[in-house]
Image (cartoon, grey):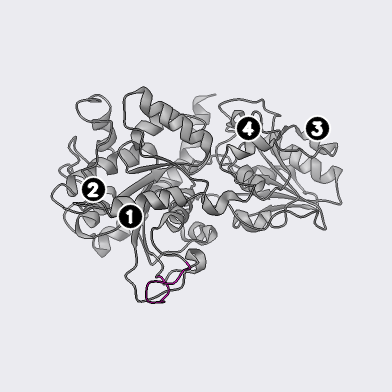
Amino acid sequence: MLPSVWGVPPSTTKPTRIAVLADSDTRWKWGALTASRIAPGPSMEAGPQGEAQVAPALDGFLLRGRATPTPRQLAEVGVRADSLKEVTAVEFLRTMAQESYDVLVLSLVGGGVQAMLHGLKRVWEDREQRPVVVTGYVGVVYEKLADGLLLRHGADLVLANSRQDAERFRAVYDGVGADSTAVTEVALPFLGGAKYTGEHDPYTVVFAAQPSVPESRKDRTYLLNRLIQHARLHPEREVLLKLRSKPGEHTTHIEELPYQKLAQKFGELPPNFQLVYGNMGEVLDRTDLLVTVSSTAALESLHRRIPTVVLTDLGVREVLGNHHFVGSGCLASWDQLDAGHRPTPDADWVARQGVAADGSYETAFDAARERITKLLAQPGGLPPLTPYYTPATAPGYLPGILARHHLGPDGTPLPGAPAHDKEPGPVRQIVRRAARGAYRHGVQRVAPVIRRMGEL
């Protein structure tokens, strides 16, 4: 049985079956929570005979790779499913050929979405009924807009987390002659929590760290030093460094220079300075000032109306992602924060970002839910998936994307694809876990050393 995240009591009515395929902890969180919000049918209202509607049934699939979440990361996300298993792309496609779902959420990087769309088109080509396929972005879209969008084209719904993104998405699709009707405006699915009502005791400042922004040791050390200095300047405040992962774990992005390792070089830290993990929502419950470079946590904070700062110390640059917050009223520096500055967000900017601080969040997913309901009721089932990229339109690009997931140009598993014809046995599963551990160690520990040696 699903936990209370669905917010719906169980019944004997047949549940909506939803599958979510994700490739990192953050994308699992986005995919699972999105599934809960767009699931058609169930509501708190009674059914035709007075019975309660049944909660959707969620099956989770974690795509094997460098960022496959660990059990600790999954527990921190706080979203559970009826079943959860780790799969290769080919194993997932085999499951989709055998199982019947109502909705499939692809919560992957763009190339992964494109590969699955072609693979699914192939495995469903002889089926009368297929699931509604949904995809989108985990958070703020500030880079690779055209590339990422065209790789996601072909899904029945491409979710845009804000009015601004919906307009940009449609403009890209229309601009290349692709069908833009799949673009559907929603909001970030993980917003929520109590609205900020005033200062806590002690006043708490939280810096939301990001795995790859900024990237250099110099910049990350600078930010950590300023955070520690702020704690020393304000001993009456509690200063928290909110970390995404522990050393050796991967998130959506590779973290080569974890802040917890950099902190070891600072010697004795102020008593009011702490490194914390855990669910971001729980940390925001005690936050009076949220500081970040460009984390999606800023949008979570703004949704709750918590004072929020996007740092300008390293410049306002596309590579940092903080350029997205131009016009937000949240841009400020550590010097200003040390002096007591508290930003006031621009209401018009916030309204365009899917933050829904005005109370409209409860209806933000209605359009997506209604659209899915109509698609599922379409006579004769849904037509085949039609991605923008095909062997004819992108012959120099698409085959390489599909090959990375062991698929041929037509979406068929390539010869020698891992476990394309049978379930992996116990020995193969053990070898996989060992190989993945070695790969993670290489990416996290060995590769950075080699890169640094090359810079000498």
Badge 1 amino acid? Val
Q: Which residue is mark 2?
A: 382
SS category of the residue bearing label 1: strand
Quadrant where the N terminus is found in the figure: bottom left
Q: Earlier in the sequence, mark 2 or mark 1?
A: 1
Q: CA distance from mark 2 to mark 1?
A: 12 Å
Q: Residue furthest front?
A: 48
Mark 3 vs mark 4, foreground winner is 4
Q: Which residue is mark 4?
A: 325
Query: Taking 403 as reference, is 314 above or below it?
Result: above
Q: CA distance from mark 3 to mark 1?
A: 49 Å
Mark 4 vs mark 2, foreground winner is 2
Residue 63 visible in this rendered orientation of the protein: no
Task: Return the mark for residue 360.
Answer: none
Query: In this view of the protein, which residue sits in the foreground, 243 or 377?
Result: 377
Q: CA distance from mark 1 to mark 4?
A: 33 Å
Query: In this view of the protein, which residue sits in the foreground, 340 or 246?
Result: 340
